[in-house]
Image (tube, grey):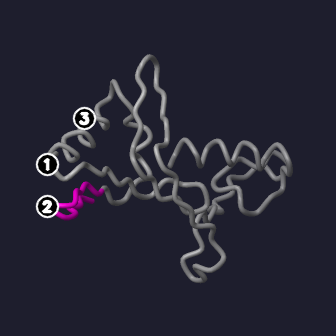
């Protein structure tokens, strides 16, 4: 989230030095700190957001590559991951896979915006963690 916020703030500042919605930034013209915040998700009017799902999203970090089965996005921000297994593979294997993916040497940064993570199969159902 912080990486996304800083990147977006930098882009907004480049486009318009006086923008109101750029989050905390230093206003050179007025020599003051502006404390406006960016709202990435419209919680008051959900219809104003873009909702999407993506299958088999490939995420690369250094020499590692991970591929969650299903990722749920709101306004392009990943908020949930779903790891699905065949009925002969335990749900715990999906849970282990999600936990391993969050290790520093893999794709930890991808999980920073995720609020809920699911793992499931046909025989054991669905489990989740927040």
* Tag shown at residue 90: 1
| 66 in relation to 64, above or below | below
Q: How many discs mark residues in the rendered view?
A: 3
Q: Is residue 13 left or right of residue 83?
A: right
Residue found 50% across the figure and 49% down from its top? 1
The answer to which of 24 and 129 lies nearer the viewer is 129
Position of 105 relative to 29 (above/below): above
For the point 27% across and 59% down, the residue is 130
Q: Secondary structure at mark 3?
A: helix
Q: Quadrant of residue 68?
A: top left
Left or right placement of residue 99 versus residue 105 in this view: left
**In the image, residue 129 above or below residue 56:** below
Q: For marks 3 and 2, give the one nearer the viewer.
A: 2
Which residue is under mark 2?
124
- Disc 3 target residue: 100
How far is disc 2 from disc 1 in space, using C-alphas?
7 Å
Is mark 3 in CB contact (under 8 Å) with mark 2? no
Mark closer to the chain start, 2 or 1? 1
Which residues lie in the magenta part? 118-130
Magenta-colored stretch includes residue 104: no
- Residue 13 in percent (x, y) is at 78, 47
Query: In terms of secondary structure, what is the magenta stretch mainly?
Result: strand
Marks 2 & 1, CB-CB < 8 Å contact: yes
The residue at the point 55 percent across, 41 percent down is 3
Label 1 crowd bin: few (<14), some (14–19), many (20+), radius 10 Å = some
Q: Taking 38 as reference, is 68 left or right? A: left
The x and y percentages for residue 102 are 31, 37
Q: Residue at x 63, y 60 (%)?
A: 35
């Amino acid at each position: 989230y912080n990486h996304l916020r800083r990147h977006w703030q930098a882009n907004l500042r480049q486009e318009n030095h006086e923008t109101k919605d750029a989050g905390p930034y230093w206003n050179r013209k007025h020599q003051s700190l502006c404390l406006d915040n960016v709202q990435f998700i419209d919680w008051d009017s959900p219809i104003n957001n873009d909702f999407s799902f993506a299958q088999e999203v490939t995420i690369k970090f250094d020499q590692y590559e991970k591929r969650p089965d299903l990722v749920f996005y709101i306004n392009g921000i990943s908020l949930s991951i779903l790891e699905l297994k065949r009925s002969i593979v335990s749900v715990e294997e999906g849970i282990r896979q999600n936990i391993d993916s969050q290790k520093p040497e893999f794709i930890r940064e991808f999980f920073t915006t995720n609020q809920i993570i699911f793992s499931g199969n046909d025989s054991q159902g669905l489990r989740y963690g927040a």
